[in-house]
């Protein structure tokens, strides 16, 4: 398989660059900038991309590369800091931009030289996203200026002969028009990529690899019902069938029908599927507990205890599987470290389970690739496209103490909200949407009688990173339909409010 190496200099968009490359059907990995020359040779990339970064190349303390990287005969694309680093190493001069010259930030109108392979077939001008305070005062010998802006004569530089390209702007962000096409040109026109990275192929390779590794051993997986663990389960099921045991802890804090849906999705495989209905256990532990962090802790711990009990029944297993995905790997620092990360939905690694080795079949995949793989494996769309759902489930969406009665109310209200969003075809306009059962009760009137019932809050946000989020402007008539239905269909609720707070200052969840 052809591979591209993305060397990370600490830029905020490192993962985005890698995703863009993969979207172009070329496999790539993000590695720390100090990867040794021998390791790079062994990796055998068809092209190298230097990411941006927050530093200035002329400072000794900034991240640098072994200059011999430019003698490997491998094309290089430098982005922002990466561009300056290349210029700095090959005899150019990078300095701090003066106020009145080329410090640029934001959307910038840019002109391109279409005879350059990077811009082949693309418009001669357009918007790029700039974010740099340093400036290439002199470009290295052999390089041509292939793009400029009003403020900056060298928005992009190219040495076509050696296949070295540098861009001051960020082609990987959406604000740059045709940015992905520029990356595609680098991959196909410069590096000669053929594009052999597809999820169909990945599925076959991953199945083969798992089979080879597992042999006739036993595999255990904690299945939460989330996208990652479900796709990991499907892949393992396809690879090793009955050697796999999935333990699905149903803590009773799932949404309506969720447990059954998860179970049904795995019915077609001949695996050992253990569903532990632990609702009562969780509710007993949660009784009377109102403080959110305390609830989280109880749920996380209880999850482990239940899983432990089931695992003990199975006895010794050879492999413990986890649904770790690539962003977890990159974020944890070094891509090659054997990170044993607590699964976000489990809350801690069950270290008491007697196993030889961990397997993480999704370790090199981004979330959108995981979803694609799930489709390839025949998982239903509602599982593959499932929105994020917190590990503690509805336990942190019932405000205050949790009871079965309140959970049932919330489950119905939440279902109606999701149902109406689906009927209005609005799922694509929001990243997370759910109902919250507040602990406020208020007076209402229904029929001829007085009611004193709960208030349900609806929350819907759009976000790309879940670190910041905006509330979604859901059309009034859709909100109205949700409100009417919940109040009519769900006993115990007489008032609906819509949360119009962004994050920050509010968080996405209420607890
Ligand atoms: P907040 O509420 O912090 O949520 O704005 C950001 C994202 O994280 C999810 N979330 C959780 N996920 N365990 C999880 O697995 C948790 O305890 C938890 N709390 C919040 C939340 O749903 C949103 O997607």
Image (cartoon, grey):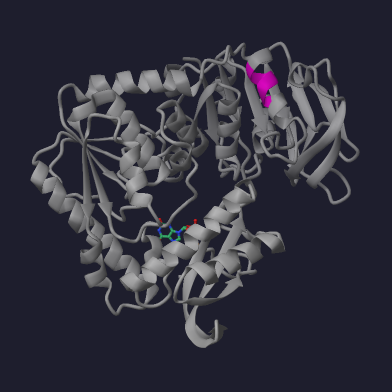
Residue found at the far right of this picture: 150
Image position of 344 (left or right of 185): left
Q: Which residues are magenta?
A: 183-187
Q: Is residue 153 visible?
A: no
Name the main secondary structure of what is drawn in magenta: helix
Residue 207, position as x, y percentages in the image: 33, 22
Image position of 274 (left or right of 208): left
Residue found at the far front of this picture: 448
Q: Is residue 209 above or below residue 313?
A: above
Image position of 233 (left or right of 194): left
Q: Nearer the viewer, residue 120 or 429?
A: 429
Image position of 98 (left or right of 27): right
Residue at 62% x, 46% y is 428
Question: In the rendered image, which quarter contains the C terminus?
Answer: bottom left
Residue at 14% x, 37% y is 317
**Residue 385 is inside the magenta segment:** no
Residue 417, position as x, y percentages in the image: 54, 60
Residue at 47% x, 24% y is 199
Residue 329, position as x, y percentages in the image: 41, 40
Q: Nearer the viewer, residue 167 or 220?
A: 220
Residue 408, position as x, y percentages in the image: 38, 66
Place residue 59 in its image quadrant: top right
Place residue 236 in its image quadrant: top left
Q: Is residue 438 above or below residue 73?
A: below
Q: Nearer the viewer, residue 20 or 272?
A: 272
Residue at 31% x, 36% y is 266
Q: Nearer the viewer, residue 296 or 450?
A: 450
Total marks shown come to: 0
Q: Is residue 145 visible?
A: yes
């Amino acid at each position: 398989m052809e591979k591209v190496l993305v060397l990370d200099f600490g830029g905020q968009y490192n993962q985005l660059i890698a995703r863009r490359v993969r979207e172009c059907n070329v496999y790539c990995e993000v590695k720390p900038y100090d990867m040794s020359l021998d390791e790079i040779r062994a990796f055998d990339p068809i092209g190298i991309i230097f990411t941006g970064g927050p530093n200035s190349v002329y400072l000794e303390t900034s991240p640098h590369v072994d200059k011999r990287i430019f003698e490997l005969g491998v094309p290089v694309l430098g982005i922002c800091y990466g561009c300056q680093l290349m210029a700095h190493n090959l005899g150019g001069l990078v300095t701090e931009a003066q106020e009145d010259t080329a410090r640029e930030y934001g959307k910038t109108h840019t002109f391109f030289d279409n005879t350059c392979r990077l811009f082949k077939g693309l418009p001669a001008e357009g918007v790029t996203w700039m974010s740099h305070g340093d400036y290439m005062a002199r470009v290295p010998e052999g390089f041509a200026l292939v793009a400029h802006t009003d403020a900056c004569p060298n928005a992009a530089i190219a040495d076509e002969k050696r296949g070295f390209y540098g861009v001051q702007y960020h082609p990987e962000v959406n604000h740059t028009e045709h940015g992905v096409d520029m990356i595609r040109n680098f991959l196909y026109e410069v590096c000669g990529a053929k594009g052999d990275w597809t999820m169909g192929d990945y599925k076959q390779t991953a199945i083969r690899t798992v089979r080879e590794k597992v042999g006739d051993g036993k595999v255990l997986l904690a299945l939460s019902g989330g996208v990652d663990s479900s796709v990991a389960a499907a892949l393992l099921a396809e690879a090793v069938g009955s050697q796999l045991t999935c333990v699905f802890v149903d803590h009773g804090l799932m949404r309506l029908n969720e447990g059954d849906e998860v179970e049904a999705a795995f019915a077609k495989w001949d695996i050992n599927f253990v569903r532990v209905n632990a609702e009562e256990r969780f509710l007993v532990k949660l009784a009377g507990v109102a403080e959110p962090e305390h609830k989280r802790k109880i749920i996380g711990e209880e999850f482990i205890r239940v899983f432990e009990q089931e695992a003990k029944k199975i006895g010794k297993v050879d492999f413990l599987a986890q649904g770790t995905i690539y962003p977890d790997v990159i974020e944890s620092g070094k891509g090659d470290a054997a990170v044993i990360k607590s699964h976000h939905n489990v809350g801690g690694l069950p270290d008491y389970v007697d196993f030889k080795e961990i397997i993480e079949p999704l370790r090199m995949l981004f979330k959108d690739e995981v979803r694609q793989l799930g489709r390839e494996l025949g998982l239903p769309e509602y599982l593959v496209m499932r929105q994020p759902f917190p590990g503690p489930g509805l336990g942190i969406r019932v405000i205050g103490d949790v009871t079965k009665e309140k959970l049932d109310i919330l489950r119905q209200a939440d279902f109606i909200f999701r149902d109406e969003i689906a009927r209005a075809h609005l799922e694509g306009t929001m990243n997370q949407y759910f109902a919250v059962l507040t602990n406020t009760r208020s007076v209402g009137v229904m029929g001829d009688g007085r009611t004193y019932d709960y208030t349900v809050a609806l929350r819907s946000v759009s976000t790309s990173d879940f670190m910041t989020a905006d509330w979604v402007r859901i059309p009034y008539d859709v909100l109205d339909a949700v409100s009417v239905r919940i109040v009519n269909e769900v006993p115990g609720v007489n008032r609906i409010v819509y949360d119009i707070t962004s994050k920050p200052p509010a968080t996405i969840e209420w607890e």
